[in-house]
Amino acid sequence: MTGVNPESFPASVLAGAISQVFILMSMVIIQADLSSTQHAAAVVALLDSYARDPAGGGQPLAQYTRQNLVAALRQRMDTLVLLAYDGDQAVGLVIAFEGFSTFMCRPLLNIHDVVVLAAYRGRGIAGRLLDAAENIARQRGCCKLTLEVLSNNLLAQSVYRKAGFAAYELDAAMGQAWFWQKKL
């Protein structure tokens, strides 16, 4: 963190920030207040930009999701949402959910979405968002961070490795864990 003064950022960005503010270089990373219309709009816009990207499936968010996502996130007590701002522009997002490690008998934080607008990639924003999520996870007593990444998203894998992430395995003889799904 640098000695940047939080008062140098627009009040509209900082208004309603729940508890955590991380100021890094010219960027401000805040824990989103999902009751703030500005933060809510930023979450939906950033997630939609990710959904439209090939790494996010290449399709816009469904109208239902756009209309209901923030309300659904607000109902969950295990949600962490971080926003990265460059001035008044929301440029990055992390959405994470607390889970539980039965082997460690402690909470964990699963990073579900990492988004940086295309024009802002390569500036270390994703790494800063991950650092902020890690700091909060440590404050919450979490034993680890988890995330999933597409096998061909080499840029994201590089960012995650730099942040200290690695493929998961309990025993090398049993191999690495795979993330599977069954749609309901």
Image (tube, rainbow, N blue to C red):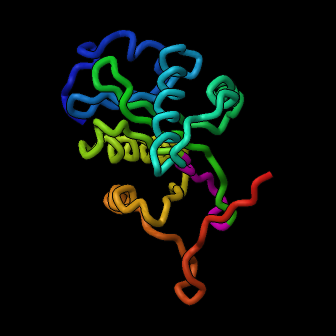
Residue drawn at x 33%, y 47% as measured from the top left? 127
Magenta stretch: residue 120 in it? no
47 lies left or right of 179: left
Task: Report x, y in % for residue 23.
Answer: 29, 30
Task: Report x, y in % for residue 174.
Answer: 60, 85
Residue furthest to the right in view is 184
Establish if 84 lies above or below 7: below
Magenta segment range?
103-112
Task: Report x, y in % for residue 54.
Answer: 46, 49
Residue drawn at x 42%, y 59% as measured from the top left? 153
Quadrant, the N terminus: top left
Establish if 130 lies above or below 144: above
Residue furthest to the top in view is 11
Establish if 84 lies above or below 130: above
Q: Quadrant of residue 66?
A: top right
20 lies left or right of 8: right
Magenta stretch: residue 107 in it? yes
Residue nearer the viewer, 93 or 118? 118
Residue drawn at x 54%, y 14% as measured from the top left? 37
Residue nearer the viewer, 115 or 20? 115
Count of numbered tags:
0
Residue drawn at x 37%, y 46% as measured from the top left? 131
Establish if 141 lies above or below 22: below
136 lies left or right of 162: right
Residue 148 at least partly seen: yes
Residue furthest to the front in view is 59
Residue 141 at least partly seen: no
Task: Report x, y in % for residue 177.
Answer: 59, 73
